Image: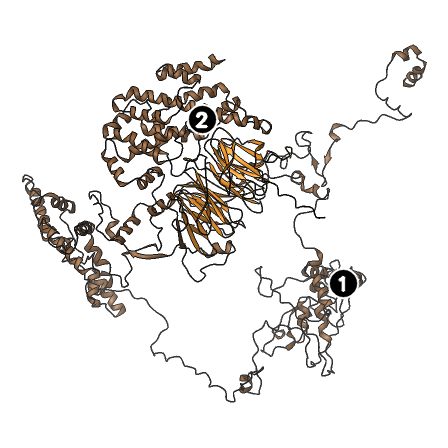
Amino acid sequence: RRRGQKMAAPEASDSEEEELAGYGTALEPLPEGERIKKPVPLQEQTVKDEKGRYKRFHGAFSGGFSAGYFNTVGSKEGWAPSTFVSSRQKRADKTVLGPEDFMDEEDLSEYGIAPKEITTTDDFASKPKDRIKEKARQIAGVTASIPGATALDDLIAPSKITIGVELLRKMGWKEGQGVGPRVKRKPRKQKPEPEVKVYGCALPSEGSEDEEDEYQPENVTFAPKDVIPVDLTPKENVHGLGYKGLDPTKALFGVSGGEHPSLFTDGSEKTSNLLGDLRHSKGRKLGISGQAFGVGALEEEDDDIYATETLSKYDTVLKDEEPGDMLYGWTAPKQYKNKKGMEKEVRYIGKILDGFSLASKSSAPKKTYLPPDLPRNYRPVHYFRPVITARHENPLLLQALVESTGKLETDTPQQNRHTLNASQRRELLGETALKGPSPSVLEYLSGKDKERIKEAKQAAEQQMKTQTLPQQSLNISSSSDGVHHKWQMALGGQLATPGSSDFKPFAKNPEKQKRYEDYVESLKQGQKDTQESHSDPGMTEWERGREREEFFHAAVLYKSSNSVLSSRFTRAKHEDDTDKVEVPRDQEMDIDDKESAVKMKMFGKLTRDKFEWHPEKLLCKRFNVPDPYSDSSIVGLPKVKRDKYSVFNFLTLPESSRTTITQTTNEKMQQNINLNKPKKPSRWDVSDKEKKKKDSISEFISLARSKVDIQQQLPESVIEEDRSRTNEPLPNKAVNESTDQKEESRPSMDLFKAIFASSSDEKSSSSEEDSDEEAHQPPSPVPNSESTKHTNLPDTSSADVQECMAVTNEPDLVPPLLKEELDKEEEFGPRLPPVFFSKTTQEHEPVPLASSLEANQKEKPKKNKEKHKAKREHKHKKEKKKKHKKHRHKGKHKNKKSEKNSSSDTADSSDSLSDIEEITDLSSQELLRRLKHLPAMKQ
Amino acid sequence: MAFPEPKAKKPELPKKLVQNLECKQGAVRAVRFNVDGNYCLTCGSDKSLKLWNPHKGTLLKTYSGHGYEVLDAAGSFDNSQLCSCGADKTVVLWDVASGQVIRKFRGHAGKVNCVQFNEEATVILSGSIDSSIRCWDCRSRGVVPIQILDEAKDGVSSLKVSDYEILSGSVDGRVRRYDLRAGELYSDYVGSPVTSVCFSKDGQCTLAASLDSTLRLLDKDTGELLGEYTGHKNTAYKLDCCLSEKDTHVASCSEDGQVYFWDLVEGSLTLSLPVGKGVVQSLSFHPSEPGLLTATEGRVQFWREESHPAGS
């Protein structure tokens, strides 16, 4: 039928052909007489891996033939994906996966990817493997039909010589020789040559057997004998020592001869056995023997395969070890039994040093001490006897025990050392008692207190008895008055007792100590003029004051525990410098001189300090610089020890108000006190301008200033400032100055109240204004705030949003809480400019690129400046207005005046924003409302 | 016939803006050229440190790992490592290529203002608001600094390191120079909190910017005043100053959005370059060519001399 169609095709009419349009390539016509292949049935469409296992097909897109880990959804590590590493450090490293990571191990070789494991190549492989192989080969050789055929194999075997052997050969070693320098050797006794056929490869060590020669020329050296490596394999089985399992060679060939070391004639044959050499008894005919035939028990020539071990086979006598035992160095040193005697043994064999000669007389023999004679009734067994004391309750038991042991412990209880207490032991040992007061609480108390306690005790007892008696007052006489009374209370009547205690805080200065003791005594007695009476008349008032304070602190500090402590601790033997403190040797010179030098621009010697400075050794090393002070151990600035004023300088008690230090003290003290003061005051705390002012302008002015009322002071100082500073006065500078002034001389409290206690949403405090001024210095609408620093405005914010921001960020709307935070976060040192993106300005005035720069250069800055000024101006004005409104009565208009002074151009601001604000005094709500509408209006 | 010596070209100042990098990392606290001037680092207030090619204007890598804003950074001589410091009180050593933190040095008690490598990048020196300079060893694994230079009485705001000197400017108004070779410390009083110091290229002078809106050029050996440069505004912020590539000019940031250039010898203002509206906080001069990087607000601008071919 098909043919019929084919035939029909050419017969089709031309028109039909023309009508048909052929697409693609035609299938090849089927060859004739061929059947269509039967499709492979589905169950036969299987895939097997290289090991013949069926592979499951998971789908082309879900793993192919091997999905997951062994066709599971897990992984080698389990369920957790291995790529996840939760470590901050490893964040940046991205593991680059290669194709190997996705390939099966089996496929690696297929794609020519080298295995990554390290293995020893054959060249470097060591011997043991070969030995097993060889043995197997030997067995095979023996069992083979043509014996010795395998020997040929050995000969023909490819030369696989390990590197070590090759190297040795290159160095002149031959197989069968030992390794090492050549030696001279005496000819050895000829040994009976065992008539043994050796099959298989002769092992290297074997050749050593028959290398002896009778004739031994003098100058001939020999290679050392080969040494058999000692087998150091640990014993891992539970067999007895030396046990070897049934050796097939022995069992099969009946080589019982080699079974036991001493079975053969004494000698080096043993060694060959060790090597596992195959050896046959003499005259043994090799026949076909094996499992198939069994071990012919009846075979005549068969040796006893059931080898009976007889004692005669063992050595019964300890003999000389053969020199050829090949275990040099592994056996215990031989005992020399030479008949030549002791002297030979003693003799030093070897090279004698020049100038020395061998001793002719041997040194005295070692003296040996006999063990002591044991007593006759000594029994080398010890019996433990229970300790019986007389206190035992059970007399019967006691008696029984006494009888049994024949001994009674008659010790009295006090002789039992465990029952003794410390003081008893001390007595026994004859030690003296501690010098401190005995550790009883009562001992520490003064007589008065004891009485008090007694009273209290009695009172308590009485109360217990009657429960009706009124509690007795524990208060003692309230004798003293004033400060002293307070002190007495503070000390709780438990002042240090000068007589009884060892506490001597001023032991170094006996006079002072005496004064202190007197002081404490008097304090106890309740005198008012505690110290004054005892103080040194030569002392100044200031010193006296210091000392009083010190004494007081000392007394307080050591009021209760002093005696306990003093009895427990001993005084240091070596005096350490408690009253010295380490300070840098060189101090930077007085800053005032420098200040004036700077003022006069006299830089150089006047402003420079030069110090010796020791860099760390390692630092020098790292900088590749020789250590300038290689022999000193100082690091940094050299330090010196200075007198510390007193320990009590460092103690601060809350109730004691520190006395101000007056000028009377000597300079050294002053210096040290300065050192101990809170370190490193930040210059930024106090404006440097203010400081400068202090220096530059005479004392008189500052003095006057402090006296003069604030209101008067402000403008004056501003003017002053203007005069002193030649720089062009910036509009806000004046404000700065004025606030500085204010800080300097504290205004009255009600001013603060007026400022801080005013309505919460009002921004009017002068100090805050100050900070705000600074914040607005950069022409940015966003105020300088730590909080806004980190909240960057999003880049996507459109212009009008920015505009809105610009106005909403007016100080009025900043919540007061935030402001406080700002102040708190005020930092030291030069600050960092605020974070902001002045998107709006950028958009209005794109930063000129190089081409347009020249043109803009003249215009832009001016424009900018004007704009800034305008902005600043309206801000000022607004603030002024607020102030005006709120604090008119506080005389704040002075401030305003000053601003007016400093600000030059106020009128010509055409900014719309400022217009709005100038027109009205708007409430904040109103302002906010309008601002919300502002963008819309603009649009 | 001998030709006359070609007349030395008059040193040009970078006036032409060639690149404008929007860093997108908050305020750019510092911008620093690397050793050869091919790359630059920007320290952002969003805790990130970025590496740029300013010539092409491309961002190469971002280094994140600081816990607070980054305040200063420096590159090692072989460009293999970076160090940065920040308000998180740490000094971080970075691997340039991988972007990983190699080490973090903790020990400063306050924010760390400035950081420098020594010449061989074996030591990192960092100056902090805690008034100490700490020398960290990059070689050993120790956590304690090699040495702490705590002579400053107030925060250390700026730090420079030469092959054997450490120059520091402190808020206590002093410029201190530690000379390791001589084992001496020279302390020059300037009178006003020092915000930035730098060595001149010839190593003879030190330049110190202080909060009294003045730059002073001091003789390194004697401490004498060689020049004083005023006209800009620097009263509150920590702004940078620098010298041009041939020590011909002195440049300083200003709070009025400009960068000022003075003639080093005459002390006259030669150029005020309007950079932006905000404070120009940081600048860095190319080590060998007239190129200047300025950082203001969130962007960094790269300026070249007028004759510089714009394309390259």
Q: Is residue A669 visible?
A: yes
- The quarter of the image holding the N terminus of chain A is top right
Whether callout 1 and callout 2 share a subunit is answered: yes
State the brown chain.
A
Looking at the picture, which amino acid does disc 2 mark? Ser
Q: Residue furthest top?
A: A15
Badge 1 is on which residue? Answer: A142
Of residues B60 and A697, the one drawn nearer to the viewer in this rendering: A697
10 Å crowding of disc 2: few (<14), some (14-19), many (20+): many
Q: Quick check: A842 left or right of A313?
A: left
Q: Quadrant of residue A208?
A: bottom right
Q: Which mark is residue A456?
A: none
Residue A646 vs A685, above or below: the answer is below
Q: Residue furthest bottom?
A: A360
* Discs 1/2, front: 2
**Who comes first in sequence, dot 1 or dot 2?**
1
Q: Is residue A450 visible?
A: no
Residue B206 vs A56, above or below: the answer is below
Q: Secondary structure at mark 2?
A: loop
Residue A882 vs B263, above or below: the answer is above
Residue A12 vs B122, above or below: the answer is above
Residue A436 in percent (x, y) is at 18, 60
Please state the chain letter of the residue tagged with numbered disc 2 in the rendered image.
A
Looking at the picture, which amino acid does disc 1 mark? Val
Identity of the residue drawn at 27% across and 37% down: A701
Please tell me the colour of chain B: orange
Residue A855 in percent (x, y) is at 56, 26
Identity of the residue drawn at 33% across and 46% down: A592
Q: Quick check: B45 left or right of A248?
A: left
Badge 2 is on which residue? Answer: A780
Of residues A667 and A615, the one drawn nearer to the viewer in this rendering: A667
